[in-house]
Amino acid sequence: MGKLNKGYVQIYTGNGKGKTTAAVGLAFRAVGDGMKVFMIQFLKTGKTGELVSAKKFYPDLQIFRFEKKRGFVWTLKDEEIEELKKEIKIAYEFALKVLEENQCDILILDEIMGVLGNKFLTIEDVIRLIESKPENMELIMTGRNVPKEIIDKADLVSEMKDIKHYFNEGVPAREGIEF
C-alpha cells in the first residue's frame, strides 16, 4: 500500500448516532481517491446498507465479519459468549495480520470499543493494534466509552453527542438510516 505518507489513529466515540456512519463516509471518500480500505465489524451480524453498498459499488472497500448471527451480548448464554470470544479472537488476529502486512491504506475497526467494553479484548490488546500500525496506514476505531489509555494513543478523537434523539420517543432503528 502507500497512498498515504503518514497515517494517523482516529477514534469516533460517544453516545450519539453516527460513529459507524462517519467511518463509512471516510471510507467512501478514500476509495473514491484510489485508496484500499478494510473494515472489520465487531458485534454486528445483521444486514446493513454499508455491506450491500460496498459489494455493489466499492470493490476497494472490503468489509469483514467473523461472528455468526446471534442476539445482543446481554441476551447470550454462556456457551454463546464463549463462541463469540473465539470469533472475536479470530477477527483480532486478522486485524493484526492486516496491520503487520500493511494490506490496506485505511483499516477501520468498527465497534472495537464495544468489544473492549464487554471484556472480549483488553486495553493492552487494542494498544497492540495501535502500535502495530504502519506509518503509512490510517487506523480508525469506533465505539463508546474509550479508555483514557487508548485516547492518549490516538491522534484524533471525535465524540458524537446526543442532543435530541427520536429513539427516546420510541422510534426503532430504521433500515437505511441506522443500519
Image: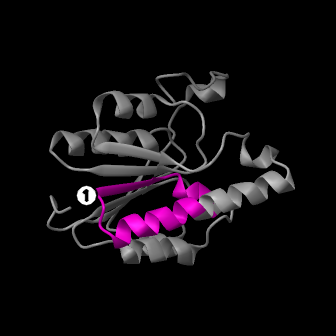
Task: Reply above or below: 73 against 10.
Answer: above
Residue 15 lies within the magenta run:
no
Q: Is 47 on the left-hand or right-hand side of 107?
A: right
Across and down, in percent, residue 147 comes to 54, 69
Task: Reply above or below: 13 against 19.
Answer: below
Whether residue 146 appears in this view of the structure is no
Label 1: how many Cα within 10 Å (few below 14, some 14–19, many 20+): many
Q: Is 64 on the left-hand or right-hand side of 121?
A: left
The amino acid beneath tag 1 is Asp
* Count of number-bearing discs: 1
Across and down, in percent, residue 138 comes to 29, 61
Across and down, in percent, residue 174 comes to 55, 22
Label 1, on which residue? 105
Residue 107 lies within the magenta run:
yes
Across and down, in percent, residue 54 comes to 36, 34
Residue 27's image quarter?
A: top left
Element assignment for label 1: loop
Whether residue 135 appears in this view of the structure is yes
Residue appearing at x 18%, y 39% in the figure: 32
Q: Which residues are magenta?
A: 90-116
Residue appearing at x 57%, y 50% in the figure: 66
Residue appearing at x 49%, y 38% in the figure: 17
Residue 87's image quarter?
A: bottom right
The answer to which of 120 and 64 lies nearer the viewer is 64
The answer to which of 110 and 144 lies nearer the viewer is 110
Residue 28's image quarter?
A: top left
